[in-house]
Amino acid sequence: MLTGALLAVAAAAGVPWPMVGAIALAVVHPAWFLAAVAGWVMWHRRTGRSPGPDDEAAFLRGLAAELSAGASLRGAVVAAARRSPALDLGRAARLCAAGRPAGEIGSELASALPVNGTAAAAAFRLATRTGGSTAAVMEALAERAEASGRLARERSALTAQARLSAWVVGGLPVGLVVLGVVTGAGPGGGDLGPGGTAMVAAGLALIGAGAALVWLMAARSAR
C-alpha cells in the first residue's frame, strides 16, 4: 500500500508515467527490471540518435551552397537532402523531383526541420512565387540552427551534474538491492521477512521517486 501511495504521489507531481512504471517494476520484480533496461539499451543503440539542430544546419548550408552555385530551388533541395541522411527529407526530395506544388514541398520541409522548419518552408514558397534567390536566407537559418545547437549543449552541460547526482543517489542503492535479490542475499532471499521486505520496498520507492523528481527538474531546465 505504501509503495502504491508513493508512486501515486510521484505521478501527481509530474513524473512521467514510463518512469513511474519503471520504478514500480524495479521494486516489485527487480529481475524483470534489469531485463527491460538491457532491452531498452539495445533498442536505443540500434535506432540511433534523433536529428538535431546541427544536422539541420548542415542541410541548410548545403542548400545555400547549391543555390549559390546556380542550382534551381527544387534541385538544390534534392542535392542537399542526399547529403543529410539524418533528416527525414526523402519525401520532400521526391516531391521536388516530381515537380509538385511549393505548398506540399514546404509542408514537408516544415516537418523535417526541427528548428527552422516554418521559416524555411515560408522562404521556399516565397522564392518559388517570386523567383528570387534564397541562398542568404538559408545561410542565416543555418546560423540560427547552429546557435540553437550550442544553446542546447550548454544547457545539457550545466544540468549534467544534477542528472548524474540523481542517477548515483537513486540508482546506486537500487542497484545494490537488485544485486542482492539476484544473488539471493537480499529481499526475496528469505532473510528479512514480510515486514522487512515491505520496508525495503518502501525505501526503494522513496529513493526512486526522489531521483525521478530530480531528473525531471533537470530535464525541464535543459529544454
Image: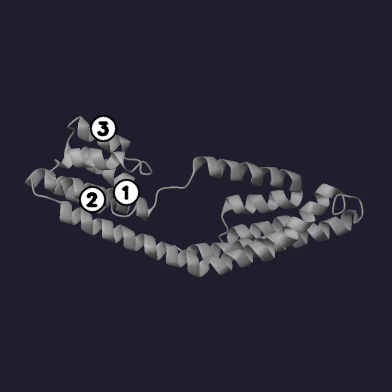
Q: Are marks 3 and 1 in contact (CB under 8 Å)?
A: no
> Of 67 and 176, which appears nearest the observer?
67
Q: Is residue 112 left or right of residue 131?
A: right
Q: Amino acid at mark 1?
A: Leu
* Residue 29 visible in the displayed image: no
Left or right: residue 130 compared with residue 29? left
For marks 3 and 1, the one nearer the N-term is: 3
Residue name at image x 75 percent, y 45 percent: 31
Q: Secondary structure at mark 3?
A: helix
Q: In the visual, does 179 lie left or right of 130?
A: right
Looking at the image, the residue that sits furthest to the front is 69
Quickly name the residue at label 1.
Answer: 113
Residue identifier under label 3: 94
Quadrant in which residue 107 is drawn: top left
Q: Which residue is mark 2?
A: 120
Residue at (30% x, 38% y) in the render: 82
